[in-house]
Amino acid sequence: MEVNNVKLEYVCGNSSQFPVSNLNEIAFAGKSNVGKSSLINTLINRKALARTSAQPGKTQTINFYNVEELLYFVDLPGYGYAKVSLKERERWGKFIESYLINREQLKQVVLLVDIRHKPGENDKVMYEWLRHYQSNILVVATKMDKIKRSQVQKNLSIIRKELAMDNNDILIPFSSVTKQGKEEIWNIFKQWIIKEE
């Protein structure tokens, strides 16, 4: 999909700030520094609309990006970063959970994992949890350019096994550097979310 008009419309620190809207929403979840902002920027053809940070745990808000007045991309805070206090992590957890469970406009969740590593406990818990609450889950394995091409299929198999994914669950390798995976991800969005007028 060709994206020309995107804006960061809402930065929400609590659920009362969520937009009142009938646009469908696609949420992006993953541990800190897994590449959520880079994926969003690639999908919307921007260099830095979604803020990337070298400091994990930086995003503490739920950010709503209006894409072509068609839908919202929703950037969730990264999970599992140890330097954030336990109390703060619990607060984020409840905040994210309430969004994922209660938000009627939420139509799909994209779970990001790093292709270079086995999914961690937090990734497994999040995937299990999402499967319980959401029917449309897409897993994106980021940072594909950081490994050899010969390793890609092996690493994808490890991710599938560790997350206990079904054969029909969708796993797409992605690189924000080469843009590989971008078209496939948009095709899934179109299939599940964006109804052609």
Image (tube, rainbow, N blue to C red):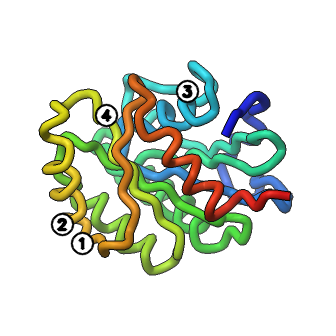
Which residue is disc 1 drawn over? 164
Which residue is disc 3 drawn over? 51
Whether tag 1 and tag 2 are in contact, CB under 8 A, the answer is yes
Between the residue at mark 1 and the residue at mark 2, the CA separation in whole angstroms equals 5 Å
- 165 or 34, which lies in front? 165
Provide the secondary structure element on which disc 4 rests. loop
Query: Residue sitting at 83 percent across and 44 percent down?
Result: 69
Packing grade of label 3 (10 A; few <14, some 14-19, many >=20) is: few
Q: Amino acid at mark 4?
A: Lys
- 19 or 182, which lies in front? 182
Give the quarter of the image for residue 107. Answer: bottom right
Between the residue at mark 4 and the residue at mark 2, the CA separation in whole angstroms equals 19 Å
Query: Residue sitting at 23 percent across and 28 percent down?
Result: 146
Provide the secondary structure element on which disc 3 rests. loop
Judge whether 68 appears above or below 97 on screen: above
Provide the secondary structure element on which disc 2 rests. helix
In the image, which is nearer the foreground, mark 1 or mark 3?
Answer: 1
Q: Amino acid at mark 2?
A: Lys
Identify the image quadrant of the C terminus. bottom right
Query: Residue sitting at 42 percent across and 55 percent down?
Result: 111
Which residue is disc 2 drawn over? 161
Which residue is disc 4 drawn over? 143
